[in-house]
Image (cartoon, grey):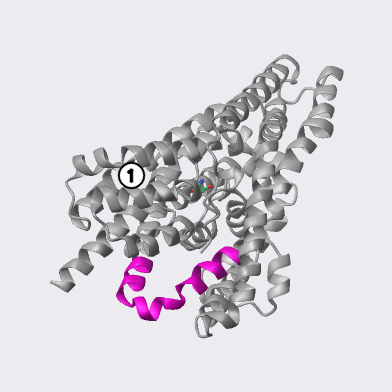
Amino acid sequence: MTDSTGTEENKPHGNLAGRILFGLLVGAVAGSLLNWKFAPAAGAAASPEYERVRWFADNVASPVGQVFLRMLFMVVVPLVFCSLFLGVSGLGDLRKLGKIGARTLAWFGITTGLAVVLGLVLMNTFEPGKKIDRAKAEEIRKEFKGEADKKVEAAKEGTGFGISTFVNIVPKNVVRSAADDRDTLGLIFFALILGAAATAFAPERIKPFVDVCQILYDLCVKVLGYAMKLAPYGVAGLVFNVTAKLGIDVLVALGYYVLVAMFGLALHQYLVLGLLARWFGGWPIADFFRRIKVLTVTAFSTSSSNATLPTTINTAVNEFNVPKPIAGFVLPLGATMNMNGTALFEGAVVLFLAQVAGIELSLGSQAVVVCLAVLTAIGAAGVPGGSLPLLALVLTQVGIPADMLALILGVDRLVDMARTVPNVTSDLVCAMWVAKKERAEKT
Ligand code: ASP
């Protein structure tokens, strides 16, 4: 299990959140003002001043942003591998735990899937990415795509929904899968099956390898923490680059995106999980939410499922009478593997960015997004921004340039705080349900 509580990254980040927001504002205001003042009218030649603004955006702002992004992307392969391997191999006692393990996994899979579908439905309905007019979308597409046409072509091959979609999940060469950012499913498959194989061995036999994976995972999380320290500057650079070239319209669309994403997260938290707590946990909705106030605030302020884990366990045991062994099994696993809010957010972002870039995602591609969002939400680290590197993978997989992530990074802190709340709440309701079932079966 990948509980790395106690590391510096897991302490509340109030200050960092403020600085990221400040970076966003500085980048956005400076970029939009310069764009508004100097950008040429459509078809006109650029003034020397505007050339200088572009030079600064290309040679100073964008590189700073790229370093930040690359710090995130750099840890993807080890993080995905270790997180999934540890999650699955940690179920070694699944056979002993029998129904508890199976129920827990079923809960994780079903609620995470529900969340992605909700995110996709909302984005398809409100279409915040289409609030940008076609010409602007085309400009953004050109600006961010670069390699994109190639990627779209490649993604068409990879995501055309058919028998090959399933065959290709099994990698021919796992090293090549790890090196190819369009073939992460291969890496994910390998990590899952290796984890499953590990459960067939005596724990002492595989412990050294598990320890190595755990250490590597913790190191990656630490590096992710360093990357987040760069976030205020990276975000300022990225947002400046975007607004200086494209103007403020982009930010207006971003506002819609945040609204729709937050609405979806609130809906999942207060309606879906509230009802599940009622039906499966056996708790009245109002009382349930009253009892999880501290949990909600902790998750919201730390943006980290790992950092919230002790509070989740306390809440389960003290407020909902979940037996300690059940809480001890379900909740740490949930902090690592079960991320409803993250999955909803991933689905929403993919669709939003596709809309911005003017890429139509077919129903088949959206089904691929659902599967990928569920899998990568399982693989995401329960730390602030833990899902961002994996999100890049989902994007490239469906033909959206990963660089477009830059668009949402500036506002991601807020969405991160909001998505961590359903992440931990779903873990809690799962523990309540498993405990209720156990009690019913014993009597
Ligand atoms: N911050 C989230 C969590 O810890 C992960 C993410 O979505 O970035 O649950």
Q: Is residue 401 at all visible to an observer of this figure? A: no
What residue range appears in magenta?
82-106
Q: Please provide percent x and percent y for residue 33.
A: 68, 16
* 35 left or right of 302 in image: right
Q: Main secondary structure of the magenta part?
A: helix
Q: Please provide percent x and percent y for residue 399.
A: 62, 55
- The structure residue drawn at horizontal position 85% and vertical position 23%, both measured from the top left corner, is 52
* 89 left or right of 211 in image: left
**Amino acid type at mark 1:** Gln
Task: Locate the C terminus by quadrant.
Answer: bottom left
Badge 1 marks a residue whose secondary structure is helix
Residue at the left extreme of this rendering: 443
* 253 left or right of 152 in image: left
Q: Residue 264's image quarter? A: top left
Residue at which label 1 appears: 269
Q: Can you say whether 17 is above or below 216 in the image?
A: above
Q: Can you say whether 325 is above or below 117 in the image?
A: below
Nearest the eye: 227 or 37: 227
Q: Can you say whether 435 is above or below 350 in the image?
A: below
Nearest the eye: 326 or 21: 326
